[in-house]
């Protein structure tokens, strides 16, 4: 497990090669999709070409960037089953530089339909490989569980970003995630490593939140990003309007924080 955390905190080179980042946490409601959408949008705002792969059947990342259900024909589900190409699936969002491979509830059936398939853990990796040269970053939003979809997401990625909420039991289930990442690294993807841990949902009014921050920093050291994302009503509202926070409320604390986090991820500082 130590090997997962032994790599350098963040790549120091600036976009020399495309980065494929899976955002994962087996605990639900930890700001995973929020982090995917807003970090990706901030990186696109910085001039990068960014692709979000919505690999969660809840399709929250898809709606959060303003793509309505039923407004597209092909989703990542059709791509995984071989009924469509990745390039045909991808939609350019209203936000410059940001594209998405959308999801629908149909994706939940892929867990069963892929079971008898040969090399089933690498379907997403193959799909992304066909378009990777068009992007600087690919972010994969996966379900809060370890099934075949998440294994595909981990197999397709170079690195894992783990959002941890600054609340009680923040580290619950994290050990199981680390074990599963280790298994994928051993059997399917020897390049995989946890490169970043992002602290989210920080409420500065509570002593507990600060204690959680310190506990996570003590445990994971330099893997923990310096920027902390505050809990924010505006941040919670933004997805219902199909807008990332930097467009919904550009001057909000959450927008400022996500811009800073994106710069940190980009530069490694």
Image: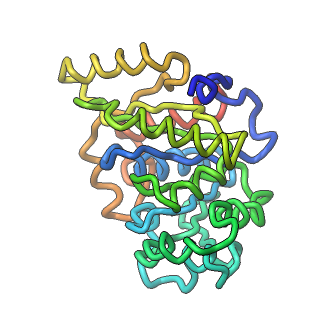
Q: Residue at x 58, y 29 (%)?
A: 264
The picture places residue 210, in percent across and down from the top left corner, at 28, 18
Q: Residue at x 35, y 15 (%)?
A: 214
In what quadrant of the picture does the C terminus appear?
top right
| Residue at the image position 26 percent from the left and 31 percent from the top | 169
Quadrant location of residue 130?
bottom right
238 lies left or right of 40:
left
Q: To which quarter of the image does residue 255 belong?
A: top left
- The reply, left or right, for residue 72 in relation to residue 168 is right
From where the camera sits, is residue 234 visible?
A: yes
Left or right: 17, with 116 as reference point: right
Number of numbered labels in the structure image = 0
The answer to whether residue 235 is seen in the rendering is: no
Task: Look at the picture and state if 238 lies above or below 116.
Answer: above
Q: Can you say which quadrant of the picture contains the N terminus?
A: top right
Give 149 or 46, whichever is nearer the viewer: 149
State the residue in front, 188 or 244: 188
- In this figure, which colouring scheme has been used for the structure? rainbow
Q: Position of residue 212 (x, y in %)?
A: 30, 22
Q: Which residue appears at 38% of the width and 34% of the height? A: 164
Q: Is residue 155 depicted above or below 252 in this figure?
A: below
Percent across and percent down for residue 239 are: 35, 59
Q: Position of residue 109 (x, y in %)?
A: 45, 76
């Amino acid at each position: 497990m130590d090997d997962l955390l032994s790599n350098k905190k963040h790549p120091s080179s600036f976009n020399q090669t495309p980065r494929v980042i899976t955002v994962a946490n087996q605990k639900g409601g930890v700001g995973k999709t929020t982090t995917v959408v807003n970090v990706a949008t901030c990186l696109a705002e910085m001039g990068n070409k960014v692709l979000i792969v919505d690999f969660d059947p809840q399709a929250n990342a898809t709606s959060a960037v303003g793509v309505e259900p039923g407004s597209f024909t092909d989703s990542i589900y059709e791509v995984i089953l071989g009924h469509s190409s990745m390039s045909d699936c991808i939609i350019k969002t209203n936000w410059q530089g940001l594209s998405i491979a959308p999801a629908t509830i149909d994706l939940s059936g892929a867990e069963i339909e892929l079971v008898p398939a040969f090399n089933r853990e690498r379907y997403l990796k193959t799909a992304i490989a066909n378009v990777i040269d068009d992007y600087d970053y690919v972010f994969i939003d996966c379900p809060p569980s370890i099934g075949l979809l998440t294994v595909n997401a981990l197999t397709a990625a170079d690195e894992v970003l783990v959002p941890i909420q600054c609340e009680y039991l923040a580290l619950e289930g994290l050990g199981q995630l680390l074990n599963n990442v280790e298994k994928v690294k051993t059997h399917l993807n020897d390049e995989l490593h946890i490169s970043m841990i992002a602290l989210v949902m920080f409420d500065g009014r509570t002593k507990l939140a600060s204690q959680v921050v310190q506990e996570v920093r003590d445990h994971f050291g330099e893997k923990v990003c310096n920027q902390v994302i505050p809990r924010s009503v505006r941040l919670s509202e933004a997805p219902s309007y199909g807008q990332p926070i930097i467009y919904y409320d550009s001057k909000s604390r959450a927008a400022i924080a996500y811009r800073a986090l994106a710069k940190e991820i980009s530069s490694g500082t």
